[in-house]
Image: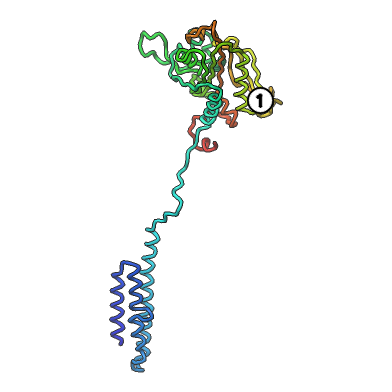
Amino acid sequence: MKDQLVSLKEKILSELAQIKQLSALENLENQFLGRKGELTNLLKRLPEVAVTERKAIGQLANEIKVELTGRVAEVREKFESHKAQSAVDATLPGLDLPRGHLHPMTIVQKELEELFMSMGFAILDGPELESDYYNFEGLNIPPHHPARDMQDTFYIDKKNKDDEYDLVMRTQTSSVQVRAMQKYGAPLRCAIPGRCFRSEATDVRHEHTFYQLEGLMVDKNISFANMKGVLEAVAQRLYGPETKVRLRPKFYPFVEPGSNGEVTCFLCKGQGCRLCKQTGWLEVFGSGMVHPNVLKAGGIDPTKYQGFAFGFGLTRLVMLKYNINDIRLLQSSDIRFLEQF
Ligand code: DAH
């Protein structure tokens, strides 16, 4: 019986070594170790063994059983951990990819585009590298006019030596006014958001690249009152229905009369605070009735048509809206800043 036990053990061990599947392992367990298995049957015959040997054989049988059960458990564990690793669970949520969002400048620009479109304004675009003519001269700013000093820009060499005008990085979206009039004629209603450039020493309030939004309306019988109406609609959309607009005379070469537009401070509602320097008003746009010379440059007869134009710093508006205290953050691509919007 002792030999039978030992050879059965060898047999079981060698079969165990060949096992490649969990189901085969279960079969093996049934065949040898289960209630009707070969080893169990052999042990049932223990009483047949001579009394003198019974104890030793019993002990051996027990050791073999413990060893085999242990080995089977080891193999099972190997299978199960492998199964867990290779299984695909289609019900698990997918990888959570970080999702981008619009830049604060774009958010405000889109909101304003919607507003202007709802008032019948076309949204136009224009070149950022512009001819001196559209950026200055066509806007009634001749070459040596002192108004150029306020908008120091990046001059770029002419494409051809005999081109009439220098090229400049546009300093204002007003540069699209004459282009729009030439292209579409009168009547005309358009809004032009876009990037502008000035040769600035940068600090928290100045940046060489910034955004403006220009508005232009040309038609018969257009008055200063029409302009104020449109500006009020814009200001109220931006800062709430109680916002008031105040216009005060200011010189801009391309409008006559020209005005400086202020809105009641959204922070203190006109009471006076740190943001509005205790005045209750925030200066946000330039505006006025389009100068006859500018209409002429655009091919429009100033005796038949009038128009108004206004422009504001979109960048400044975004800074006010989101309480951003350093203009340079807007172009910094700093994720810690951008993630806050
Ligand atoms: N382009 C002017 C600037 O950059 C702003 C401006 C003033 C635009 C008056 C206008 C206007 O259309 O009528 O300072």
- Look at mark 1 in the image and give the residue it sits on: 243
Viewer-closest of 35 and 226: 226
The colour scheme is: rainbow
- What residue is at 58 percent from the left and 16 percent from the top? 287
Q: Quadrant of residue 133?
A: top left
Label 1 amino acid?
A: Thr
Viewer-closest of 47 and 256: 256
Is there any visible trace of residue 53 in the rendered image? yes
Considering every residue shown, the one lying at the far top of the view is 303
- Residue 239 is situated, as x and y percent measured from the top left of the image, at 63, 28
Q: Is residue 121 above or below residue 295?
A: below
Packing grade of label 1 (10 A; few <14, some 14-19, many >=20) is some
Is 308 situated left or right of 269 in this image?
Answer: left
Quadrant where the N terminus lies? bottom left
- Residue 67 is situated, as x and y percent measured from the top left of the image, at 36, 77
Q: Quadrant of residue 44?
A: bottom left
Is 265 situated left or right of 81 in this image?
Answer: right
Q: Taking the image as four quarters, which one is ligand 1 found in?
A: top right
Q: Tag 1, which secondary structure?
A: loop
Quadrant where the C terminus lies? top right
